[in-house]
Image (cartoon, rainbow, N blue to C red):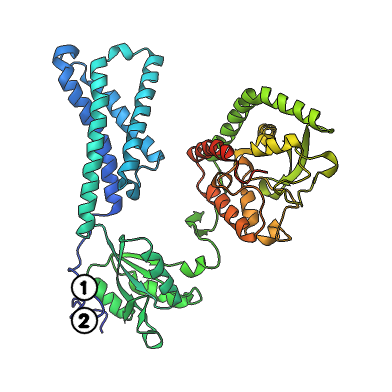
Amino acid sequence: MSASSKQPARAAGLEGIPAFEPRKDRLLSKEIVVGLARIGDFAVIVIAGLAAYGAWAQGVLGGTSRLPQYCAIIVLAAAVFTVGFQTRRGYVFERLLQLRWQMPHVIGVWSTVVMALLLFGFALKVTDNFSRGWALSWVVLTVILLVIERALLKVAIARWSRDGSLVRRVAILGAGETGERLIEAMRATGQDYEIVGLFDDRKSRLPAAVGGYDVAGTSDDLLALARASRIDEVVIALPLGAIMRIGELVQKLLVLPIDLRLSVEAMRLVFPVRGMSSLGTSPMINLADQPLKHWNGVLKSIEDKALAILALVLAAPLMAVVALLIKLDSRGPAFFVQERFGFDNSAVGVLKFRTMYVDRGDPTGSRRTARDDPRVTRVGRVLRALSLDELPQLLNVLKGDMSIVGPRAHPLAMKVEDQYYFDAVKEYPRRHRVKPGITGWAQVHGLRGEVEKAETARQRLAYDLYYIENWSIWLDLKIILMTFVAVTRRQNAF
């Protein structure tokens, strides 16, 4: 087929591909929908404020003479709300479909904005310049309109999804193993994409179908189809070793007014790919990001110090009683220090209440603690069951060696299946990219206590890595609350 052919898909002889409407500009996309949500929120807050002003203007506010003053505060509130909702990742397309997520967060962010405006007004002593009746009407009307707006937006998105306006039509160039893996990955995303054809210049050397799709033609056929029918995106899915061939295909397809992508699925099998960035003018593939950097690191540090001080103040009397009971129960100090893995695989001296007899202790941690372990004292059993032996680690948090929440600090010589942890679990050192915690995501999911199998160790690691990749203040608070529930269950605590 000639690359300049203008015939529709079926007339071009590509029977493996359904006919599509003639190519035209795409006016609707997920990005546009998200933008409409932002504009809608801003407009709703402004409209609600002006409507409330109109209702109160004649009777209380004295007409329109003070309208500019009210407009300033209305526009400020609308701008702050949209910025605040953006920081909560509310303007993400998938989130716009989740009314159960949207409603409480919309109300929560708007309530925060109102409280901030009140505090700002009190600080400047200008609250008396505004009508309380207007303010209350504005606040309530805004909530009502925002809820209605979100419901209408979801209805509109559902309609656009049904008629295909939001579905991206994708052609894949590459019918080998890389293309097959790409098809599997796209299927996992649901209905966001529609594969319109599979193409490869090596058609004669490949199977007739890959991943359930017929190999419809060559790159020339793809070029003709893209010019005759609506295709939003072409993805080149060839082995990375075919770099010269990839370059030739890119040059050929750059003439099309569509999105052109290079799949890194083959690369992802060898190492992680987290996106793209640049260093100067040189493009870079992101392989890993430093956890808790920039403001996240600052927030995490403030959280640790504040919670550690509060917990120490509240727990000080209890800690004094525990220390006394330990001294009365068995000879030896009330505390002991054990070297464990800390940030960046460094050794950290972790402080705990002593729960074992002095002459039977295991400073290296090479021996796992088992149920009814004879090394554990009477008081120690109670402390371990209630996790009270961990309380002195609050001092480690204040010192900066640990966090309240993070991957569990493991002894340096800890073993599983007669192997050191770092030998038995391949990606184990990745959990040390953040400070260890007193409690963690794995612990609140029941993965605490004795570890006999490497598979259990890998499960723990999976939870730790999830925490590192998805950290937030809210996740930390959730884990802290779940910790109290886990302690009452006393699961695997011995």
State the residue at coordinates (46%, 77%).
244
Q: CA distance from mark 1 to mark 2?
A: 9 Å
Question: In the rendered view, does 237 fall on the left or right side of 192?
Answer: right
Quadrant that contains the C terminus: top right
Element under disc 1: helix
Element under disc 2: loop
Q: Eyeballing the image, is 196 above or below 486?
A: below
State the residue at coordinates (21%, 20%).
67
Residue 237 or 207: which is nearer the viewer?
Answer: 207
User: Residue 223, percent across and down?
Assistant: 29, 75
Q: Quick check: marks 1 and 2 in contact, CB under 8 Å?
A: yes
Question: In the rendered view, does 327 fall on the left or right side of 124?
Answer: right
Under mark 1, the amino acid is Ala
Quadrant in the rendering for residue 107: top left
Q: Which mark is residue 12?
A: 2
State the residue at coordinates (65%, 59%).
453
Whether residue 64 is visible to the viewer of this picture, yes or no, is no
Q: Which mark is residue 228?
A: 1
Q: Eyeballing the image, is 440 above or below 68?
A: below
Neighbor class of circle 2 (other Cα within 10 Å; few <14, some 14-19, many 20+) is: some
Q: Mark 2 or mark 1, which is nearer the start of the sequence? A: 2
User: Residue 366, percent across and down?
Assistant: 76, 52
Neighbor class of circle 1 (other Cα within 10 Å; few <14, some 14-19, many 20+) is: many
Quadrant in the rendering for residue 170: bottom left
